[in-house]
Image (cartoon, rainbow, N blue to C red):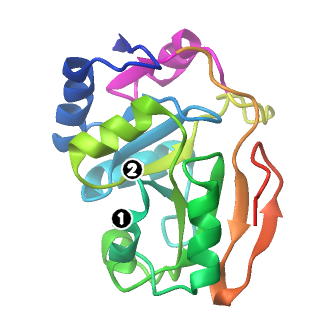
């Protein structure tokens, strides 16, 4: 199902449909400030496993991200961090960054593994953040890529995404064309700050 939502002023009723879908174990494709994401409720193990199978991921090793509304949720999933790292994140979020942080004991319980790190995203996108706000907790997310294994490009046209992902995604949100460039990934584990993938964002210290 293709659901059009205005990117600047998301309709509350449409966001509500997406949230209801997630609460019922659904999977959605949604826009971010970088590329389109494929997401589900972090508390739904069956939906998480469906995404992992679709992407060919091993949940014990996969690097998946949590999309949050702001930084208020992250203490539920990450270990205490230094003031330096927290202030740096506040300066750059919402924005096109994925911050890799040391996970607390809640993350392994969600994934049923021994995962010690977690990626945190707070995208500068009204649709994504309103979904999380109405849901009341983060969503699990992975990037939408072209179905051809030989292609590394991200898909940008929501109508084409709906054609290729209708068998996995219950709702594909059309929030306009997505970007080609993924987020900048910043590793903050162990107390350090290291850019491990250059993406759309330019980190401010």
Residue 14 position within the rendered picture, expressed as x and y whole percent measured from the top left: 25, 19
Residue 25 appears in view: no
105 vs 200, nearest the viewer? 200
Task: State how far apart marks 2 and 1 are (Cα).
Answer: 8 Å
Q: Residue at x 79, y 31 (%)?
A: 151
Total marks in image: 2
Q: Is residue 58 visible?
A: yes
Check residue 168 for magenta coloring.
yes
Relative depth, front residue between 144 and 77: 77
- In the visual, does 155 lie left or right of 80? right
Q: Is residue 143 above or below residue 185?
A: above
Q: Which residues are magenta?
A: 155-175
- Mark 2 in CB contact with mark 1 (< 8 angstroms): yes
Q: Is residue 162 magenta?
A: yes
Q: Residues within 10 Å of mark 2 (few under 14, many from 20)?
A: many
Q: Is residue 159 above or below residue 37?
A: above
Side (left or right) of 14 relative to 104: left
The residue shown at (48%, 65%) is: 59
User: Which quadrant of the rendered structure holds the C terminus?
Assistant: bottom right
- Write down the residue under mark 2: 69
| Residue matched to label 1 | 72
């Amino acid at each position: 199902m293709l659901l059009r939502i205005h990117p600047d002023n998301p309709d509350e009723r449409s966001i509500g449909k997406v949230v209801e879908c997630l609460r019922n174990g659904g999977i959605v494709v949604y826009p971010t400030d970088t590329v389109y994401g494929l997401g589900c409720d972090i508390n739904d193990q069956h939906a998480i496993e469906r995404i992992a199978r679709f992407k060919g991921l091993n949940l014990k090793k996969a690097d998946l991200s949590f999309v949050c509304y702001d930084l208020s949720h992250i203490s539920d999933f990450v270990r205490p961090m230094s003031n330096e790292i927290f202030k740096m994140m506040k300066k750059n979020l919402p924005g096109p960054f994925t911050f890799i942080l040391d996970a607390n004991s809640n993350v392994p319980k969600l994934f049923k593994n021994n995962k010690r790190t977690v990626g945190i995203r707070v995208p500068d996108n009204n649709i994504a953040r309103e979904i999380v706000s109405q849901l009341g907790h983060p969503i699990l997310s992975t990037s939408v890529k072209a179905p051809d294994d030989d292609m590394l490009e991200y898909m940008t046209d929501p109508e084409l995404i709906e054609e290729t992902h209708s068998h996995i995604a219950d709702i594909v949100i059309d929030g306009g064309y997505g970007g080609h460039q993924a987020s900048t990934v910043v590793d903050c584990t162990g107390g350090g700050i290291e850019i491990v993938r250059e993406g759309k964002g330019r980190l401010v210290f």
